[in-house]
Amino acid sequence: MLEKETTETILKSELHIDTLNNSQALNVMINNHLRAFDEIKNSLNAIELAITRIVSSLSENPKSKIIYVGAGTSARIAVQDGVELYPTFGWPSKRVRFIIAGGKKALTKSIEGAEDLKNQNIHEIVKNIIKPYDVVIGLAASGSTKFTVDVIKLANKSGALTVGISNNINSELEKNAIIPIILNTGAEVVAGSTRLKAGTAQKICLNLISTLVMTRLGKVKKGMMNNLIATNRKLSKRKKQIDFLLSRDKGH
């Protein structure tokens, strides 16, 4: 299976960072990361489709939720995106959920084997969390993570809109998600360490999707966070400035 996954392949010997000095190694790593941006550009049509369908789903039902699914690094990247929706855009916390292999403790402690466990009560989790009007976004660099693929399959059966973000072509996640987004980032400078450019591509992709979805839902006005939730002094100051600028523009 692994030989088919480009994220698991090894770069050419002249690019092995352990044989290079710091300057050379950093340049190899930076150039390798740039492919993340290229793959985002190559996937813009799929990303745009996902945004359009997600906006439609979230607009149609006031109970609809964005549900992120993942294991390991992909789960942590998903949580980074999802937890920002409330303070940045005022998106209700109850309309964002996470289904993570290994549960909350997997966010701060590596429990990588959790993604392979069969008895995780996935059916019960899906039944209790995912509804037909929800949006489910599954992330898996390999595209073959059993936990994530199984949740996506069950989400499809529930009638939810499913989006699958992976970094390998012809993966199970690609085959099962209603809207697949393939970020074919290829080999990492440390073979198989998808927290590198595969993770970078996933984070950029989620940034694009969540930001434009929230913008289309009216959470951004004149390039500003008009629904910002002020949770500290810095944000309180920013919110006052935003409110002042928007109210001033209304008067003109």
Image: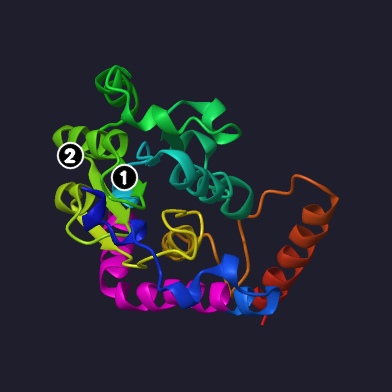
Graded by Cα atoms within 10 Å as few (under 14), some (14 to 19) or many (20 or more), the crowding at tag 2 reads some
**Circle 2/circle 1 CB separation < 8 Å:** no
Q: Position of residue 192 (x, y in %)?
A: 41, 54
Residue closest to the eye, 26 or 41: 26
Is 195 positioned to the left or the right of 7 in the image? right
Identity of the amino acid at label 1?
Val
Q: Which mark is residue 156?
A: 2
Q: Nearer the viewer, residue 14 or 162?
A: 14
- Residue 122 x/y as whole percent: 29, 23
| Front residue of 164 and 15 | 15
Region in magenta: 28-56
Q: Earlier along the polypeptide chain: callout 2 or callout 1?
A: 1
Q: Could you tell me which residue is drawn at 40 percent across and 29 percent down? A: 113
Q: Secondary structure at mark 1?
A: strand
**Closer-to-camera residue (165/227):** 165
Number of other residues with Cα within 10 Å of mark 1, as a class: few under 14, some 14 to 19, many 20 or more = many
Q: Main secondary structure of the magenta part?
A: helix
Of the 4 image quadrants, the one containing the C terminus is bottom right
In the rendered image, is residue 132 in sight?
Answer: no
Identify the residue at image location x=20%, y=53%. 171
Q: In the drawing, does residue 145 fall left or right of residue 247?
A: left
Q: How is the image coloured?
A: rainbow
Q: Where's residue 9, x and y in %?
A: 34, 61
Q: Which residue is mark 1?
A: 135
Q: Secondary structure at mark 2?
A: helix
